[in-house]
Amino acid sequence: RRDLPVNDFRIRMLTPGVTLNNATVPLPAGWLRTRISADSVQFFTTSRPIRFGQFVEGFRFEALNVADTFRVLYSTYNSGDFLCSDTATLVCSPLDAIDSLRVRSAPNCCSDLTLKNAHQPGSSLDRFVLRVLTPGARISTAPVAPTGWTRAGLPAAGDSVLYTRTTPMTTGDTAAFNGLCFDNANAATDTLRYSWTTFSGNVPVTRGTQMQICLRPLTRCDTARITVDSTEGATSRCLSLFVTNRNSRDETITRVVARIANPGTPRRILTATAPGGWQVSQISSDSVVFTGGEIEAGDARRFDFCLSLGDSTMRDPVTVTWRTSGAVSGLCSGTININANIIRSSDAVDVSEIASQNPEYCCYSIAFLNRNDKGRTLTGFQLEVVTTDVLFGDATGSGPWNVVSSGFPAPQIGFSGGSVAPGDSTPRMSFCIDARNIPGRPATIPIIWRSYSDTTLVTSERLSLRCVGQVVEQCDSAQLLSTVANEFKCTYSFGISNLHSPPSSITKVQFVLTSAVGEFDNARASGDASRWTQISVRRDSVVFRGDSIASRATVGTFSIDVDQNEGVPTTFEVTTYNGDESICRDVITGSCGPASITIPTVPTGFRLGDATPNPLTDRTSIAYELLRPSQVVLLLRDESGQLIRRMDFGQTGVGLHTVAIDASTLPSGLYLYTLEAGGERWTKRLVVVR
C-alpha cells in the first residue's frame, strides 16, 4: 500500500507493569502526541504525513517502571486505516558511550566497515545487522565475515545481512567488515541510506544510520547541437553549442566542456562567450571549459566560441566533442561533426509547457520562426507524434492561423491560413497531447515538426517535449438555488458542484454564517442529497456528511433555516472536505424577500471552466466539458449586456474542449462570457486590465 502515507503512529507497551509518563517531550515538526491510555501513546499529523520512501525521526516517549529492557508493539495507520505493525525490544539502561562504526568509501558504490565494541557500561557483542533503508536499493555484495564471525545467507530481497558469533566480541575489540557493496539502479535517488545495529544477547545495544553516494546508471543523457556562423570570413568560424539537460538523474549541469578535433591544418580556439551566470574558466588551443552556472533539468543554454580555420589546406568536417558534468561527477558526452564552410540555418520553433484543464493532457504554447537560409515565405506547419502511446487531444490557432485536423484525438495536426516572411514568426498557438499512457512525470514526448512553403517541405526536425504535467487548479462551487421567507425565518437552499483538481470526492460540507444578522435554526438535505445527514447545527455553522459527491458532479438540495428579518443580505462561507481534509472554500451572499426566489441550477449537459488567466491583459483560455454532443456557441458581452463577439463552434462532441479569447483590442472593464449548448447556458465573468 505504497500509495498511502503514514499520518498516525502508535506504540503500546507489551511488558507488564510498564507505563507512560504524559509529560511533554520534543516531537518531529508538524506532529502531535496524545496518551491513549496508561500504556499506549499515539503520534499523529494533519500536515506532515510520511510518504513512501521518506524517513522521519524524533518520536519520543518516556516509559516508567522499567527494568533494563522492555518490549513494545508499534503500528502505523493512514487516517485510521491500519497499515503495518511490528514488535521491538528497547534498552532502558543509559549508556555512557555507544559502539562505533568507521566507514571508508571504496569504488563502485562499496565501503569497508570497522566495528568497535565501545559502549559503556561494557558488555560483549554477538550479533551485527546491516539493513538497507532506501526503497529500490539492495545489498549486491555482503562483506566477508571477519574471523570469529559467521554470515547468514543474503535474503532474496537483498535488503539486510546478519552476522553472528558464538564467542562474544569483548569490550574494546574491533572487527573489519570489508566489501559492502550496494545496487541502487532501481532507486529514486543517488543518496543511499542504510542502518547498522549491534546486539548483546537479544538486546539491541547501538543503532546508527549511514549515507553513501551511489550514482545510478544513466538511462537517458543530455543532448547537444551546434550551429555555425560563417560571417567571420574565410579565416575563422563562430560556433554555438546548445546544451539541454535531459539526463535521467535530473541532475543539474554545472560544467560544460567543448573540444575541437579535425584533420588537416590545426585550428585554434580564439575566443569564447559564456551565457548569463556562467563564465569561461579555461581556454586552450583545442578546448574550452565553461563553469560557474547551472542548467536545471529540462533547461538549455547556449555556449559560443570562435576558432581559426588555418590556411586553404583545411578540410571538413570539424569534430566537436562535448561533455557535461554535475556537482559530483561527469554526466554525458557526445561527438558532433559539422561543416565549417557553410551556415546551417533552418526554421525553428519556440515551445513551452502551459497549464492544462485535463490532468491526463500535456499542453504547450508554440511559435514557428522563419529562419531558413532559402529565403522562403512559410505558409503551413505540421506536428506529428512519433510513438503510438500518445495522440494530439486538442489544438488552438491564433489570428489567421487555423488548426488543420480530421478530428481529435489525432496522430497529426497542422496550422494553415497565414504566412510568415523570412525573419518573422507566427503568433503563439497551442496544442495538447493525451499522455495518459505515459507513466510518471516529468516525461519526454518525441514529435516531428515540419514547415512548408505552399506544398514544398522546407524544414523537418525531431523535437523532444518535456511534460511536467501542469494542471489548471479549479475549485468546487456552491450555488444558491432558492430562498424562501416565512415570518422571521428564511430558508436558503444550496447545490454543491465537485469541480476541484486534482479530482477527488467530496464527503463533507460545512456552512458558516459570516454576517452577524441572524443565526442557524435548522438544517436538512433532500433531492440528490437525501442520503446526506446534518451532523452538527450550531448558531453560526452547519455540517453535512453523507454519500460522496463524485468529481464533476453536482448534488442538491442542502437547506438551512436562518432566524432573521426579510431582505437582509446574508453571507455564507461554504467549505468542502474529503474526509477531514478541507479542499475548497466558496463565499455566497443572498437575501430573503417576501416571496420565493428561485435561482436556476447549473446546466446538466456541460461544465464551464474559469478563464485562465483572469484578470487578463491580452489572451485567455476557457475550458468547457460537454456531457453530450451539442451545438456550441460562445458569446462575449460587455458589462451593459451589449454583444461584443459571437463564436459558433457547430456540433461538438463529448469531452473536454478549450477556446482562446483574444482581448488585446478590448478596453479595461468587466465582461461576461456565456456558453450555450443543448438549450442550456452558463455565464461567468471576465476582467480585462490595462
Image (tube, grey):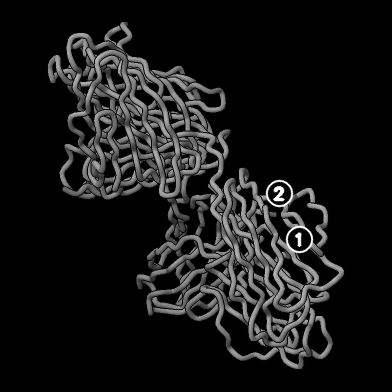
Q: Amino acid at mark 1?
A: Pro
Say which of 260 and 590 sits in front.
260
Q: How many marks?
A: 2
Say which of 184 and 587 sits in front.
184
List the residue tagged with mark 2: 141
| Residue 403 in the image: above or below residue 6 | above
Q: Quadrant of residue 570?
A: bottom left
Q: CA distance from mark 2 to mark 1?
A: 15 Å
Residue 530 visible: no
SS of the residue at dot 2? strand
Q: Amino acid at mark 2?
A: Thr
Residue at the (72%, 87%) spot, across then down = 93
Q: Could you tell me residue 49's position as x and y percent?
A: 58, 65
Q: Residues within 10 Å of mark 2 (few under 14, many from 20)?
A: some
Residue at the (84%, 87%) spot, across then down = 16
Q: Could you tell me residue 648's position as x and y percent?
A: 35, 28
Q: Could you tell me residue 644's position as x and y percent?
A: 22, 36
SS of the residue at dot 1? loop
List the residue tagged with mark 1: 146
Residue at the (47%, 22%) spot, across then down = 385
Q: Could you tell me residue 309's position as x and y percent?
A: 20, 18
| Quarter that holds the N terminus | bottom right
Residue depth check, mark 2 versus mark 1: number of the one nearer the observer: 1
Res 604 label: none
In the drawing, does residue 679 fall left or right of residue 57? Answer: left
Residue 323 visible: yes
